Amino acid sequence: MTASTKKVTTRIPENKDIPPKDTENSAPATRVLRQFRVVVNAVKVHFRQVEKNTGIGGAQVWALSIIHAQPKIGVRELAQAMDVHQSTASNLVKSLIQQEMISLEKHPIDRRSVMLTILPKGKQVLKSAPAPFTGVLPNALSSLDTQTLHRLEKDLAKLIAALQADEGAANTPLADL
């Protein structure tokens, strides 16, 4: 081969998302940032899979699962079970009603209250949804011991303060972020 016909090959790494080998030597902030990326990616992958399998968002699937588990639940109780604002739960309910996945009926005693019931279409969606219905992060957090959760809570509070973040986002489902 002549110099002009020499074949040049470039080695491209198979997975560019793999952190450099010197992870242990990286700055602590860099290592923690990488951990946050892993957590956020796990959450995103799960919610993408939920939407791909069901055609609806993760928060809607979670709401469906609660309504299925607690027939005749009210919107206020649904909001409490999901730890979201009542207006957020109301919006989820409206969407699920429009999609004919749940029904709503007035409470027989307190006519201001409503009762929610899952419909066959909603049950079918739940069958196709990957678990956990609450999402992978809440599920993982619930598996941790109390001491670890207290430590995380304390340390994340410092991070939230450093970010000067809007703590009103605390009641927004992860699937809606």
Image (cartoon, rainbow, N blue to C red):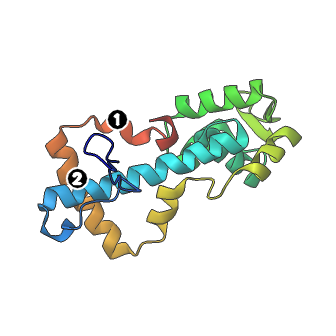
- Which callout, 1 or 2, points at the residue further toward the start of the chain? 2
Q: Give the side of residue 117 with respect to residue 32, left or right.
A: right
Q: Residue at x 12, y 68 (%)?
A: 25
Q: Residue under label 1, please give it.
A: 168
Place of residue 102 in the rendered image (x, y in percent of width and height, measured from the top left): 79, 36
Res 101 → quadrant: top right
The residue lying toward the viewer, choosing from 81 and 38, is 38
Q: For the residues labelled 1 and 2, say whether their Cβ atoms are less than 8 Å apart.
A: no
Work out how far the residue at label 1 is from the one at label 2, CA to CA, in angstroms: 14 Å
Res 34 → quadrant: bottom left
Label 2 secondary element? helix
- Tell me if residue 168 can be seen: yes
Place of residue 41 in the rendered image (x, y in percent of width and height, measured from the top left): 43, 50
As drawn, 79 above or below 159: above
On residue 95, which mark appears?
none
Q: Give the side of residue 66 with respect to residue 157, left or right.
A: right
Residue at the farthest front position: 2
Q: Amino acid at mark 1?
A: Gly
The residue lying toward the viewer, choosing from 25 and 75, is 25
The residue lying toward the viewer, choosing from 115 and 39, is 39
Q: Residues within 10 Å of mark 2 (few under 14, many from 20)?
A: few
Q: Residue at x 42, y 72 (%)?
A: 144
Place of residue 13 in the rendered image (x, y in percent of width and height, measured from the top left): 35, 56
Q: Residue at x 14, y 63 (%)?
A: 26
Q: Amino acid at mark 2?
A: Ala
- Tell me if residue 63 can be seen: no
Label 1 secondary element? helix
As drawn, 104 above or below 24: above
Q: Residue under label 2, please give it.
A: 157
